[in-house]
């Protein structure tokens, strides 16, 4: 899952940034239809050619003389892009922010502004622009919802991101391939391999030539313990591409090599183990008890387990057919909200796999949490950390959440600190969680340090959020005089 999660990092998330015609543009003309299908409009290409010789200053002159609202909007976007290309990013951002503050009813205008801001890594402002576009269409704006979800994912606001991406899918009757792909990435980031696999499979049904979805799905299946199905996904994709006489993308070939290499290592390990067993005449190993209730560990034990988790040697997950079938049945039951049935099936999968099957153990914990059984959920995830350490780093984040709800703040802070240290490049939002829990503990200097680290890591995502300055000032005051709570 760690390998899969890093492959699904925030920088890789793609926006559907095709421009749309302004609501105030003329209703007729092929250019409007081209914008809506995402192709480059001929009128914009011609305008760019005209402006090319003049650069940003020439565009400013044309903009000052233009009176038509739709054409002004297009020229403003063109000017922002030209300013950015000339290294005048601050001017580009200032222009786009002035456009964002305009009082006008024009959903495509704000959608396009959001795309431009997102390309300049002004994530917070992009969110505001997309929300304006969505609100002006009373929620019925699938492409803006999708891009909103992508940017919220980059910001680590996962619940809001899931709501936006799910809305985009519903608006398109679940036939929006890119939204399904992005939702799969979000699920993978959260450690939900089963849900990610479901979305990427849907993406390929909708858009069979979606190479990124094929790669993501294959890697997820391989990580899940099904290398045969992973290879089938990639080989089927290659066959479809070949029928169109197109070359197989390099990323598909790389993923296939990874799956084959992992399968070869697993086969060699099985052969070595079989040879050793036969030589010793050993009996079948005893099944290790599964974690279905509280583990008998103290608070000090929990902190020690969290602190000492190490990244193990990467290896292929070995899951037999019976165990994998139980895992699939558990996922179906959970997807259909039959949670109690899912719990039984996850536990059966864990037992069938010898007492530990990482995807089943993790999803057992997630299911227990959805039923409000946080103590048991924490025990299930702690077992993953105990066994596999930092191979599944997102588990530290979930464990921190569960312990915070239980009021076990020291364990919660330790888990969030490991998540932040291991995943900061993928999601600096973990430092917000750490800061919050340290403040609850009264450890204000550490809370301040965590918040300042979050702001440092997110400096490239645009202007700091509105609440940041106030929170920093308050924590500095508390750190200087802890008596002022």
Image (tube, rainbow, N blue to C red):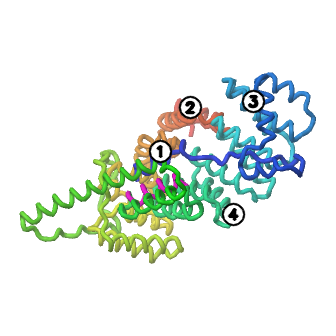
Residues drawn in magenta: 210-222
Q: Which quadrant would residue 348 be assigned to in this image?
A: bottom left
**Crowd rating for badge 3 (residues with CA inside 10 Å; few <14, some 14–19, many 20+):** few
From this viewpoint, which residue is outermost toward the left? 280
Tell me the distance, in whole angstroms, between the alpha carbons under discs 2 and 1.
15 Å
Residue at 78 percent of width and 45 percent of height: 110
Q: Secondary structure at mark 1?
A: loop
Q: Residue 172's mark? A: 4
Label 1–label 3 contact, CB within 8 A: no
Task: From the image, tell me which residue sits under label 1.
Answer: 441
Q: Earlier in the sequence, mark 1 or mark 4?
A: 4
Q: Which quadrant would residue 101 be assigned to in this image?
A: top right
Label 1–label 4 contact, CB within 8 A: no
Q: Secondary structure at mark 3?
A: helix
Q: Is 399 contained in the magenta span?
A: no
Residue at 49 percent of width and 56 percent of height: 242
Foreground tag (4 vs 2): 4
Tell me the distance, in whole angstroms, between the alpha carbons under discs 4 and 3.
34 Å
């Amino acid at each position: 899952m760690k390998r899969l999660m890093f492959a699904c990092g925030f920088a890789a998330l793609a926006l559907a940034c095709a421009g749309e015609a302004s609501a105030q543009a003329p209703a007729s003309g092929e250019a409007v239809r081209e914008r809506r299908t995402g192709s480059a409009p001929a009128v914009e290409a011609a305008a760019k050619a005209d402006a090319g010789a003049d650069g940003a200053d020439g565009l400013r002159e044309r903009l000052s003389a233009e009176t038509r609202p739709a054409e002004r909007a297009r020229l403003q976007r063109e000017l922002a892009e030209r300013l950015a290309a000339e290294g005048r990013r601050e001017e580009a951002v200032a222009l786009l922010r002035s456009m964002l503050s305009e009082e006008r009813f024009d959903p495509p205008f704000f959608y396009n502004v959001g795309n431009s801001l997102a390309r300049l890594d002004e994530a917070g402002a992009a969110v505001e622009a997309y929300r304006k576009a969505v609100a002006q269409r009373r929620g019925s704006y699938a492409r803006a919802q999708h891009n909103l979800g992508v940017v919220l994912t980059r910001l680590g606001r996962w619940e809001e991101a899931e709501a936006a991406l799910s809305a985009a899918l519903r608006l398109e009757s679940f036939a929006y391939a890119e939204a399904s792909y992005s939702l799969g990435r979000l699920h993978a980031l959260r450690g939900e391999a089963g849900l990610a696999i479901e979305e990427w499979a849907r993406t390929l049904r909708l858009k069979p030539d979606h190479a990124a979805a094929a790669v993501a799905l294959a890697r997820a299946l391989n990580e899940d313990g099904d290398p045969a199905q992973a290879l089938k996904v990639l080989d089927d994709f290659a066959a479809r591409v070949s029928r169109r006489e197109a070359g197989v993308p390099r990323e598909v070939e790389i993923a296939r090599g990874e799956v084959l290499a992992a399968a070869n290592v697993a086969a060699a390990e099985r052969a070595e183990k079989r040879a050793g067993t036969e030589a010793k005449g050993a009996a079948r190993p005893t099944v290790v008890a599964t974690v279905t209730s509280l583990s008998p560990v103290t608070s000090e034990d929990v902190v020690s387990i969290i602190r000492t988790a190490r990244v193990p040697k990467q290896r292929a997950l070995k899951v037999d057919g019976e165990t994998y079938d139980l895992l699939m049945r558990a996922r179906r039951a959970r997807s259909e909200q039959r949670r109690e049935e899912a719990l039984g099936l996850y536990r059966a999968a864990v037992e069938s796999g010898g007492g530990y099957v990482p995807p089943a153990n993790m999803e057992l914990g997630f299911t227990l949490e959805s039923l409000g059984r946080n103590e048991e959920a924490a025990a299930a995830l702690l077992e993953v950390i105990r066994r596999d350490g930092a191979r599944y780093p997102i588990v530290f984040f979930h464990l921190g959440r569960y312990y915070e709800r239980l009021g076990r703040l020291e364990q919660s802070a330790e888990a969030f600190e490991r998540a932040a240290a291991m995943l900061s490049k993928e999601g600096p939002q973990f430092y917000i969680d750490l800061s919050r829990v340290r403040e609850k503990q009264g450890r204000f200097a550490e809370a301040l340090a965590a918040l300042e680290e979050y702001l440092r890591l997110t400096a490239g995502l645009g202007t700091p959020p509105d609440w940041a300055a106030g929170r920093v000032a308050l924590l500095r005051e508390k750190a200087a005089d802890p008596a002022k709570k």
